[in-house]
Image (tube, rainbow, N blue to C red):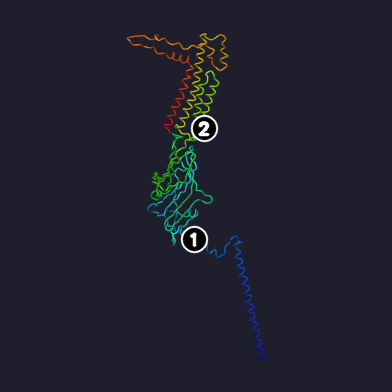
């Protein structure tokens, strides 16, 4: 009986040992399978889940290693950023730095210009200071700008302006550990430029872009150029109609009766117009039309259709040039330099037409007098002569020169003094009528000399 009990105990111990061994072997196999499965998924998860990294790589992300968020680091929730820095004390200094990227357009009709620039603000807000071992700044975009205080600088006399937003809003905010801040925006502004066109197109225009705080006067915000004249930088700018002579930064004060004095910054630049475009489009065509009108002085005075058509063509062409120039200019109440040149040239063209009208009228009077005096040749048909060109023909009529006044006639001696009777107005008119061909002869010389003198005076005054 005792032996049977011992044997039973031995069997039970053997079964227990065997079950433990099986459990250990099975557990080792299952854990090995799980381990191999995890390794396999870790190697292939970046392919299966589109580049997703495992938890070990996620721990290397800098945004996850921060103990606190940006709002907590800068203590944004602890302060009221609706108030300026140092509220209740002296005004906060705000430095301005501008880099002009381009001048996009200049409109004489609207009297404005469009400029694209980088506007940078510098100030210090100790509320945004943060601890840093490396003393490195932190850069943010427009999302943080909406949560803190920034200067409310605007463009005086601006018509339109906008901040570029492709592909995101072109706004940069850089915060330094000591609380110094750099705030930069890329903006395009269309502003007023009061232009003086009294010397157009030989003019020089002075334009300026003005910056000022809208809400804070000089007691709350002191606006200044950060680096003096070096605060204004420009890229290489080329314009189609202007030379840019000078860019200059200046400052001043602006007074408003209801709110007080404000700091104002000026971006001044001088524009000098290209004259060659207007020489080709306006001045040279005008000169050619005036010279073309003089051709009629060399055409026979009997050729009425030729001289009249030439005169009317030049007059209409001058009218077209004047209309084209006026349509591209603002409606100002004073006379421009180009208006003086165009209207004086138009006057020369108009006088050339009037000159032929005078020649034709004098010739007709002379022929009418000869016809009344009975000096017409036999067989002369006046209706046929008039039907051809509108005036009588000198070669069909015997025209005699105006009789000279004898030397002794109309003069007398009284007390040793010779008195000469001056010609009356009628006699002078008769002299011109009888020698109407001389009008063309004198005009060939008088018109070019007068126009040359006008050009000398004009270009010496305006160039």
**Mark closer to the observer (1, 2):** 2
Please provide percent x and percent y for residue 368: 51, 12
Image height of 350 relative to 125, above or below: above
- The residue lying furthest to the bottom in this view is 1
- The residue lying furthest to the left in this view is 415
The residue located at (63%, 79%) in the rendering is 21
Q: Please give the label number shown on residue 324.
A: 2
Residue 73 can be seen, yes or no: yes
- Where's the N terminus, which quadrant? bottom right
Q: Are marks 1 and 2 in contact (CB under 8 Å)?
A: no
Which quadrant holds residue 340? top left
Badge 2 density bin: few <14, some 14–19, many ≥20, Cα 10 Å: few
- Where's the C terminus, which quadrant? top left
Image height of 90 relative to 336, above or below: below
Q: State left or right for residue 128 relative to residue 7.
A: left
Please provide percent x and percent y for residue 280: 50, 33
Image height of 134 relative to 259, above or below: below
The residue located at (66%, 90%) in the rendering is 3
């Amino acid at each position: 009986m005792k032996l049977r009990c011992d044997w039973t105990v031995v069997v039970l111990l053997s079964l227990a040992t065997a079950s433990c061994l099986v459990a250990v072997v099975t557990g080792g196999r299952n854990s090995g399978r799980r381990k191999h499965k995890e390794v396999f998924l870790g190697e292939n998860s970046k392919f299966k889940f589109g580049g997703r990294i495992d938890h070990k790589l996620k721990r290397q992300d800098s945004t996850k290693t921060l103990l606190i968020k940006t709002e907590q680091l800068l203590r944004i929730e602890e302060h009221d950023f609706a108030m300026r820095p140092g509220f209740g004390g002296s005004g906060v200094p705000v430095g301005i730095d501008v880099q002009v990227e381009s001048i996009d357009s200049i409109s004489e009709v609207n009297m404005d210009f469009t400029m694209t620039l980088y506007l940078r603000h510098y100030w210090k807000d100790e509320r945004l200071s943060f601890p840093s071992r490396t003393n490195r700044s932190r850069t943010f975009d427009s999302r943080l700008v909406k949560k803190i205080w920034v200067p409310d600088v605007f463009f005086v006399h601006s018509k339109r302006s906008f901040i570029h937003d492709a592909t995101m809003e072109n706004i940069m905010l850089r915060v330094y550990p000591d609380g110094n801040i750099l705030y930069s925006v890329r903006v395009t502004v269309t502003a007023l430029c009061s232009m003086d066109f009294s010397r157009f197109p030989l003019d020089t225009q002075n334009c300026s872009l003005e910056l000022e705080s809208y809400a804070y006067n000089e007691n709350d915000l002191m606006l200044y150029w950060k680096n003096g004249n070096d605060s204004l930088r420009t890229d290489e700018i080329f314009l189609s109609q202007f030379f840019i002579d000078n860019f200059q930064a200046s400052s001043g004060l602006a007074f408003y009766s209801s709110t007080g004095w404000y700091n104002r910054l000026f971006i001044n630049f001088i524009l000098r117009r290209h004259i060659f475009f207007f020489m080709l489009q306006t001045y040279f065509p005008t000169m050619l039309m005036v010279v073309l009108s003089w051709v009629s002085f060399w055409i026979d005075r009997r050729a009425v259709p030729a001289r009249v058509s030439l005169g009317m063509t030049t007059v209409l062409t001058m009218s077209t040039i004047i209309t084209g120039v006026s349509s591209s200019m603002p409606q100002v109440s004073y006379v421009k330099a180009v208006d003086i040149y165009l209207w004086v040239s138009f006057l020369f063209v108009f006088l050339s037409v009037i000159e032929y009208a005078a020649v034709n009228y004098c010739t007709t009077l002379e022929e009418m007098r000869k016809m009344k005096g009975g000096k017409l040749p036999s067989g002369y048909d006046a209706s046929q002569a008039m039907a051809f060109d509108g005036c009588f023909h000198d070669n069909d009529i015997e025209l005699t020169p105006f009789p000279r006044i004898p030397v002794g006639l109309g003069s007398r001696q009284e007390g040793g003094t010779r008195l000469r009777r001056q010609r009356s107005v009628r006699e002078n008119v008769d002299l011109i009528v009888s020698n109407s061909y001389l009008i063309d002869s004198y005009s060939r010389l008088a018109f070019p000399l007068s126009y040359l003198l006008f050009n000398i005076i004009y270009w010496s005054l305006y160039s």
